[in-house]
């Protein structure tokens, strides 16, 4: 399934850096950088879901946004469907937009409260297609059917819907232009447990129906295990491990992945009593002032001397499994 | 810890809270009864709007009235009914005998006072300590909750603490007067998993050390599985199931609990191709609660569920469920 030669790569990211400048003093001098995304490389194959997990502040959302060029990257290349979009001008970029779409975390904040559902879903069609009004309405109805919204609600406003239904509106809008690639930025984080499953199943059904490729950003490791084919784990701006789902969850290579997985509370009281948990001490360091050497060296339970002065390279240690850790640098 | 002989520290009977709105009354808490024993950790699990927070806020008069109105019930704590207590009596209980930890540690700490002042406040108000003694006790409390370099950090302000550390401060404040009961309302929801794991360990540790009873409100079944002794499952303003934690996870009886346990994916164990879904939306609670709140989403519902709201039927030594359907026979319950 993860045979590189047989699968087409849709998204290629190489050496991506996104630094936000820190300016201080009267002259707003550039005195440092918040290294939100710091030298990240990965591929996403056509039709797969790449899960991107990490704690808050690790740069996973920034990474998702910069991959769609919602920010201009500091360094690195992003190519989507064979086109390098990392340096394209806004005009050329606009032509690429129908291919790549995004579903946002907070359906309340990402839908305009003054637009009806039909207007919201139809806006990308107005912007990017030459459909006539009647054709557009047909397409809007089709999209509403696809995401499980009742057509009768087309003229209602977002506040009349529940959180799960609002997220369906956001998904319908993302689907409007038949995209190939969708970045889902914590699409279920704001939803209740029983509604999360509805939205995740919808995303999976749509993927099968339309052959979509997802970058699924989430802090919920159990949901990512459910939806993703491969998983990338981020810590402080860097991907520390990238592996096929089953390998990553059963035998994590990086000590951070291991700690993160063992911190997830399992819905099973018996497992809690027997579990041998690794509890990380301390907090994530500031991305404006990351530690010298490996970013994880301040919290790593298996830290070595070399970790304090040398940053481990991100390399393939087993077929399809990438890790950035000195433990695997033999 | 779970046997019935021990006296309860908190006894809630038939609590009813409504909110008056322009569209009529919202029945947020409907006939909720439960008890809490000394030293036990009671988990309360439910989705947003299930009434779990409102129940706890009603107990100690923290809801603004209007719009909220506690319409009936009894809350016995240390020989006193908190629902009929005067404001002054309640103030002596809140923060002293019953401590609270809220969900968001940023908004529950005051940004313009340093942390030391906020930890010392209950000590000085409730325990009458002078400034020096209060500061010493505050330092001990910060050490107790695992904040390094406690003496110096007393002079820091909330924004200088990380999310996890702020929640530790909140716990220190709640523990300041050695409460009998600690109510923790989604205390780890706003935190990352690795920090959540730290706080859960801390709470288990503190409970063993200090022997207080804890009510832990959460929507996360994983957290409940790891921390609770006994669990209340709430839905639509009511308790739908009550059981010791192992019994609940091994042998859930209410269709809602059963479905909920199946919708939650896990990081170990089997991976389902499709997640089990509970169709539909949680109820609005504006109607009179004279039918089962889960009926519209329940695949077991029959006519009686539309006409009558089930009482809590005992199905084991410490296990009861509010449902007319009997999972053991697959038919209607004989009640």
Image (cartoon, rainbow, N blue to C red):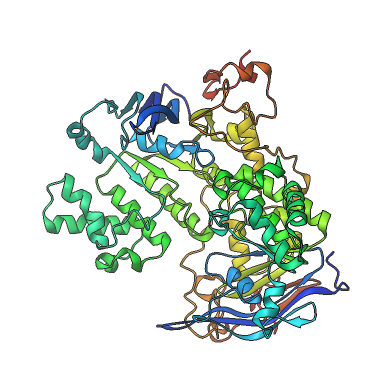
Can you give x and y, in whole percent of width and height, for residue B45 in the image? 63, 64
Quadrant of image for the N terminus of chain B:
bottom right
Query: Most extreme residue toward the right, as rendered?
Result: B5
In the displayed structure, would residue B298 be above or below residue B308? above
The residue lying at 31 percent from left, 53 percent from top is A172
| Quadrant hosting residue B212 | bottom right
The count of marks equals 0
In the displayed structure, would residue A60 be above or below residue B290? above
Is B170 displayed left or right of A315 in the figure?
right
Can you give x and y, in whole percent of width and height, for residue B101 in the image? 64, 60
| Front-lying residue, B218 or A201 | B218
| Front-lying residue, A103 or B293 | A103
| Front-lying residue, A108 or A99 | A108
The residue lying at 42 percent from left, 53 percent from top is A202
Can you give x and y, in whole percent of width and height, for residue A227 in the image? 49, 44
The residue lying at 78 percent from left, 67 percent from top is B180
Quadrant of image for the C terminus of chain B:
bottom right
């Amino acid at each position: 399934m993860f045979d590189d030669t047989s699968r087409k790569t849709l998204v290629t990211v190489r050496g991506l850096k996104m630094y936000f400048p820190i300016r201080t003093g009267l002259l707003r001098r550039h005195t440092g950088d918040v290294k939100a995304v710091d030298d990240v490389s990965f591929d996403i194959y056509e039709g797969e879901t790449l899960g991107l997990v990490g704690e808050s502040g690790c740069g996973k959302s920034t990474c998702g946004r910069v991959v769609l060029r919602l920010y201009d990257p500091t360094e690195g290349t992003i190519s989507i469907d064979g086109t390098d979009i990392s340096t394209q001008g806004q005009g050329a970029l606009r032509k690429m937009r129908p291919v790549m779409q995004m579903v946002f975390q907070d359906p309340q904040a990402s839908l305009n409260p003054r637009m009806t559902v039909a207007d919201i879903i139809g806006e990308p069609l107005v912007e990017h297609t030459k459909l006539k009004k009647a054709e557009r309405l047909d397409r809007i109805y089709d999209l509403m059917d696809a995401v499980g919204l009742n057509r009768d609600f087309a003229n209602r406003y977002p506040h009349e819907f529940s959180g799960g239904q609002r997220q369906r509106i956001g998904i319908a809008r993302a689907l409007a232009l038949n995209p190939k690639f969708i970045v889902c930025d914590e699409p279920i984080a704001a939803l209740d447990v029983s509604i999360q499953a509805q939205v995740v199943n919808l995303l999976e059904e749509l993927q099968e129906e339309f052959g979509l490729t997802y970058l699924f950003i989430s802090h919920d490791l159990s949901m990512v295990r459910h939806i993703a084919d491969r998983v990338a784990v981020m810590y402080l701006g860097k991907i520390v491990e990238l592996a096929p789902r089953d390998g990553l969850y059963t035998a994590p290579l990086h000590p951070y992945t291991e700690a993160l997985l063992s911190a997830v509370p399992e819905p099973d009281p018996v497992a809690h009593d027997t579990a041998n948990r690794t509890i990380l001490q301390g907090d994530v360091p500031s991305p404006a002032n990351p530690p010298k050497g490996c970013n994880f060296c301040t919290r790593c339970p298996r830290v070595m001397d070399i970790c304090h002065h040398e940053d481990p390279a991100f390399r393939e240690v087993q077929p399809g499994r990438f890790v950035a850790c000195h433990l695997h640098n033999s | 810890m779970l046997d019935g002989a021990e006296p309860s520290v908190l006894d809630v009977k038939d609590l009813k809270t409504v909110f008056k709105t322009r569209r009529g009354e919202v029945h947020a808490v409907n006939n909720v009864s439960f008890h809490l024993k000394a030293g036990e950790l009671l988990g309360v699990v439910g989705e947003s709007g299930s009434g779990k927070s409102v129940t706890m806020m009603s107990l100690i008069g923290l809801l603004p009235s209007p719009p909220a109105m506690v319409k009936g019930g009894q809350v016995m704590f240390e020989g006193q009914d908190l629902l009929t207590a005067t404001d002054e009596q309640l103030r002596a209980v809140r923060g002293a005998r019953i401590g609270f930890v809220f969900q968001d540690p940023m908004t529950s700490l005051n940004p313009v006072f340093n942390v030391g002042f906020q930890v010392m406040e209950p000590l000085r108000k409730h325990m009458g300590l002078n400034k020096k003694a209060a500061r010493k006790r505050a330092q001990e409390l910060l050490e107790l909750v695992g904040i390094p370099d406690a003496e110096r950090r007393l002079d820091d302000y909330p924004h200088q603490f990380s999310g996890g550390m702020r929640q530790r401060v909140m716990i220190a404040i709640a523990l300041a007067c050695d409460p009998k009961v600690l109510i923790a309302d989604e205390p780890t929801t706003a935190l990352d998993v690795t920090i959540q794991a730290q706080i859960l360990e801390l709470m288990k540790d503190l409970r063993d050390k200090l022997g207080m009873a804890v009510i832990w409100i959460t929507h996360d079944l994983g957290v409940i599985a790891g921390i609770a002794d006994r669990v209340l499952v709430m839905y639509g303003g009511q308790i739908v199931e009550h059981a010791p934690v192992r019994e609940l996870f091994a042998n859930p009886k209410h269709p809602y609990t059963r479905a909920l346990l199946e919708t939650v994916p896990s990081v170990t164990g089997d991976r389902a191709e499709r997640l089990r879904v509970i169709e539909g939306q949680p109820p609005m609670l504006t109607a009179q609660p004279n039918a089962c709140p889960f009926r519209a989403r329940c695949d077991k519902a029959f006519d009686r569920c539309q006409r009558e709201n089930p009482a809590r039927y005992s199905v084991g030594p410490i296990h009861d469920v509010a449902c007319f359907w009997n999972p053991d026979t697959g038919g209607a319950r004989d009640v």
